[in-house]
Image (spheres, helix red, strand yellow):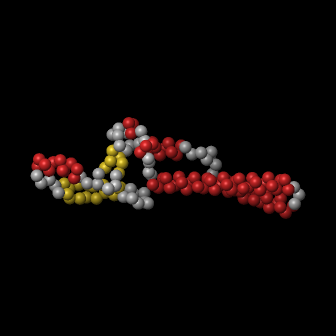
Amino acid sequence: SNKFRVTSLLNKMMKESSSGDDTGGVSIESIKASIKQKSDCVEELKRTDSNTEALIAAVQDLNKMKELASNLEEKEKQKERSKDTALVKAAKVNFSDDYFSCQTFLTVSGRLHLESYACALGNVYSFGPRFRAETSQSLRQVSEMWMVEA
């Protein structure tokens, strides 16, 4: 069965992960504009055939900028994937600051408490909301349904 962890620390963890942004405030658009400018400069140097050292330096600079752009795009893709899944490793979380101060999970069924009552009461019925954790790519991680259990 799937486990759905209950925590009040998710916003805090998401803020900490977003504060670890190491792009230095550089946007991909500005890097692409710089690549276009450097490409034009390299083409101009190739046409003039004046200084081969300047051409070699410009080509190396252009290659470094392309590598930087690909690295930033990969980081952006990973960041988007992590936002979509919103999975957090339990080992990274200090649950002592959480509301329950330990790992706490929702159950799919309300029968856990009914089994303890059934010994003393006999027939026990329950009608109420049940939550289930779904494995999906959508942002909707929890679906609610109503169920009658005996």
Q: Is residue 54 left or right of residue 136?
A: right
**What percent of the width, then of the height, locates residue 100?**
33, 40
**What percent of the width, then of the height, locates residue 129?**
26, 55
- State the image quarter where residue 137 is shown: bottom left
Q: Is residue 49 left or right of residue 144?
A: right
Work out which residue is located at the far top of the displayed protein and give it: 96
**What percent of the width, then of the height, locates residue 51?**
87, 55
Determine the residue positioned at 72% across, 56% down: 63
Q: Where, quadrant-wise, is the N terminus in this rendering?
A: bottom left
Determine the residue positioned at 23% across, 52% down: 110
- State the image quarter where residue 48 is shown: bottom right
Between 69 and 53, which is closer to the camera in this rendering? 53
The answer to whether 53 is drawn above or below residue 100 in the figure is below
Determine the residue positioned at 20% across, 57% down: 149
Q: Is residue 88 visible?
A: yes
Q: Is residue 99 visible?
A: no
Between 130 and 108, which is closer to the camera in this rendering? 108
Determine the residue positioned at 43% across, 43% down: 91
Q: Say how many tags the image has.
A: 0
**What percent of the width, then of the height, locates residue 78?**
54, 54
Work out which residue is located at the far right of the displayed protein and give it: 50
Q: Where, quadrant-wise, is the C terminus in this rendering?
A: bottom left
The answer to whether 118 is drawn above or below residue 46 in the figure is above
Work out which residue is located at the far bottom of the displayed protein and give it: 47
Q: Is residue 116 left or right of residue 68?
A: left
